[in-house]
Amino acid sequence: MKEDYYEILGISKDASSAEIKKAYRKKAIEFHPDKNPGDAKAEEMFKKAAEAYEVLSDPNKKARYDQYGHQAFDGAGGFSGGGMNMEDIFSQFGDIFGGAFGGGGGFSGFSGFGGGGQRRMKGSNLRIRVSLTLEEIANGVEKKIKVKRKKQAQGTTYKTCTTCNGSGQVTRITNTILGRMQTSSACNVCGGSGQIIDSKPPNADANGMLMTEETISVKIPAGVVDGMQLKVSGKGNEAPGNGIAGDLLVAIEEKVHPTLQREGDNLHYDLYISFSEAALGTSKEIDTVTGKVRIKIDEGVQSGKILRLRNKGIPSINGYGSGDLLVHVNVWTPKSLSKEQKEFFEKMANDPNFIPKPETDDKSFFEKVKDMFS
């Protein structure tokens, strides 16, 4: 089981954005690979802290995590709220460290990320929307989706940038009233990667990239909700120069069901029966997300009664079991009657069995609903 993100950073759930950033910086400096060379445990903690910060520093991701926990991002198909590698961390959060580890963009050259500031490019993320039925949401589903994404064209080669000599940075010296000042910034020719295009196929763009169509298999876990966004790592646009591929962000859209209505993990079903069925009792076949089931209606059932079918709702995305299916019984009143039917009901108008007699010990509607969920 994954560790709690708040515990990893050592903060409370009501921590401000400034406190989250401060806590991450403290952990990142403590476990930075430059301070702990060859220490696999420290490297793992460094990655965990970055993963926690990636989620908690984003208001939308933080809200989903607070509501659904790790299940908001983790699934069976490569979804993750983190799973970050070192390249992700240094490319996304390098500014967090400031000058804690010397020059060259804040790093002293760990695993090729430093070297005077050279960095690998990261491709842009892609976003798609996937519409799911309630049945697919209840059972989990694997979708094969066609995605158009940029990939490095075969035959594209790179050479060292002549402007920065492969360092990824250019240094400028200016004279000021305080003396000579030296400043460094990312090379504007190679974008800080230290590489430029050497040769490329004629059908590739200026960066040596091609737009391709790829079929990606996406496994969506049971219990997702409308508006939830899942991430498939590395399936966004690739980056020039063998950089880091972006991610594919999958937004969930829930289709309207013809007979079932969702409320959290519970489902609601409106069942209409006739006077005769209410008086004599009956059995009815109704829809559920796992197929049709037949339920028994006792004789004398009252309109408004709620029948509860346990665990026939939607599985909790947090793994806390499944919701229930609540069947709302509605006795249908005919809008027109034949002569014989009118005569029958006129005869029954004062019959004791047709006069409403709520039991004195009957609980109120709200008490019944409360008992139902207790």
Image (cartoon, rainbow, N blue to C red):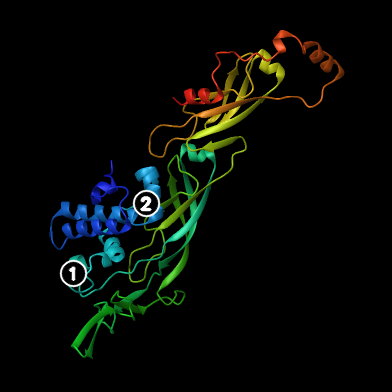
Query: In this orientation, does residue 289 appear?
Result: no
Residue at 18% in and 67% down: 100
Q: Residue furthest right?
A: 339
The amino acid sitting under disc 1 is Gly
Determine which quarter of the picture holds residue 330.
top right
What x and y, as percent, mark residue 311?
A: 46, 28
Residue at 42% in and 42% down: 221
Q: How many marks?
A: 2
Work out which quarter of the rendered image holds the N terminus and state it.
top left
Residue at 17% in and 60% down: 33
Q: Residues within 10 Å of mark 2 (few under 14, many from 20)?
A: many
Query: In this orientation, does residue 222 appear?
Result: yes
The amino acid sitting under disc 2 is Lys
**Between residues 329 and 365, which one lies in front from this camera angle?**
365
Q: Residue furthest front?
A: 360
> Closer to the observer: label 2 or label 1?
2
Residue carrying label 2? 62
What x and y, as percent, mark residue 187?
A: 30, 80
Residue carrying label 1? 109
Q: Secondary structure at mark 1?
A: loop
Q: Is residue 344 above or below residue 3?
A: above
Q: Is residue 161 above or below residue 32?
A: below
Q: Is residue 349 above or below residue 63?
A: above
What x and y, as percent, mark residue 358?
A: 62, 15
Work out how far the residue at label 2 is from the one at label 1, CA to CA, in angstroms.
32 Å
